[in-house]
Image (cartoon, rainbow, N blue to C red):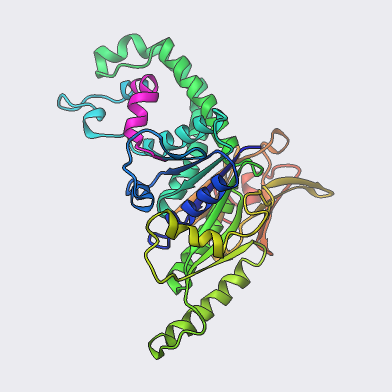
Amino acid sequence: MNRILIFTGKGGVGKSSVAAAHAIKSAEDGMKTLLVSTDMAHNLSDIFEVPMEKEIVSVDEKLDLLEIDPNYVMENDYTDMMSSLLKLLPQTDGHSMEDFGMIPGMEELFSLLKIADLYHSNIYGRIVVDCAPTGETLSLLKFPELLSWYMEKLFPLGKVAMRVIAPVSKKMFQIELPNRQAMNDMERMFVKMMELQNLMKDRGITSIRLVTVPEKMIVEETKRNYMYMNLYNFNVDGIYINRILPANIDNTFFHEWLAIQKKYIKELEETFLALPIYRIPWYDEELKGRGAVSRIITDVLTDKKLFEAQIITQREYFQKDKEGFTLLVSIPCADKKDINLYLSGTDVVIRIGNFKRNIPLPNTLRGSEIELAKYEDDTLEIHFQKEAMTDEEHGGTGETY
């Protein structure tokens, strides 16, 4: 089975070097490999010391590189789709949304669509993705699910609305609604979103790997990153602790740094006990050039199961019991007081900080109410009643648990 490995972490922790080392290792093992950068501040050309263009660049028989430019992908691969989306947006003072650049969120969409297309081409046995910093990576990965959710809710109604109001919309509101062909294109886009979502969450295909360094702020962000990745049901199956100082360093200047690193390495090991942990030393040279990056391969990437998918946490699932049904969602590293939970229509909504996820209820539970919820052992358990209570019995709707 072909594989996708996505490397993420806070900016400046060495994601690109770690991702590049994996790509080189994969190619050296004889697997046709593509190293992709989705970070708009691309640096693959710096690491490999080769000029990069907007298309795939081959560095040897088994290794190719690609720095994704979402605008270029949109203009060359998805022109019709983008044209349909732009027609939905009115012109203002003679200017369209196209004049102001990419529609918000579309960068994430087109980057992922390109990766999915490359995966389905079956040219590459492994695709290694060097992602942007944590927040942008979360936006990238959750965008297909978010867009699919909106399209699933609105698309059937939208098709009816288009037939009714399209003839008058352009004249009265200066909005050109999509014609039948455009609606068919958007329907295909919806199918593509569902396929993309399934690909990104297939635990046998896609793995998320976290890169961190043993410093307080970065360790805390790494834990939050792990929590959010699990909230959105992605398979995190490895963590890389980068820039570890040698324990026998003979310089008093580094004594305090060594103590700090020791403290946070221990914290990372205790927090991510279930994950494979890779420790990368702090090298005495800049990791620039293939030879320098290859030191990570020799020193760290020796695990025979390095490229295998390891399922650490389960997907969320509904469990039937004597009292009714329970939804179990794995959310490690969460703080109970930060979890907000409520029903919205036919969805369970879980909100933690600035992120929320809608989980559709199966038909069996439509109309049911949440009886109780608890967070124990890194798992959120949501219990549903067999029969819905009235608003008076429940005390109102939209309650947070």
Q: Nearer the viewer, residue 171 or 125?
A: 125
Q: Position of residue 169 (x, y in %)?
A: 31, 15
Image vertical order of residue 236 relative to residue 116, above or below: below
Q: Main secondary structure of the magenta part?
A: helix
Confirm whether residue 342 shows in the render.
no
Q: Position of residue 344 (x, y in %)?
A: 55, 42
| Residue, far left | 93
- How many numbered discs sit on the rendered protein? 0
Q: Position of residue 166 (x, y in %)?
A: 36, 12
- In the picture, which quadrant includes the C terminus? bottom right
**Range of the magenta residues?**
66-83
Residue 5 is left or right of residue 386, and the answer is left
In the rendered structure, does residue 140 fall within the stretch colored magenta?
A: no
Q: Position of residue 154 (x, y in %)?
A: 49, 27
In the rendered structure, does residue 74 fall within the stretch colored magenta?
A: yes
Confirm whether residue 239 shows in the render.
yes
Q: Nearer the viewer, residue 33 or 346?
A: 33
Q: Residue at x 30, y 25 (%)?
A: 89
- In the picture, which quadrant includes the N terminus? top right
Image vertical order of residue 188 relative to residue 144, above or below: above
Residue 251 is left or right of residue 399, and the answer is left
| Residue, far top | 167
| Residue, far bottom | 252
Q: Residue at x 39, y 11 (%)?
A: 179
Q: Residue at x 52, y 21 (%)?
A: 156
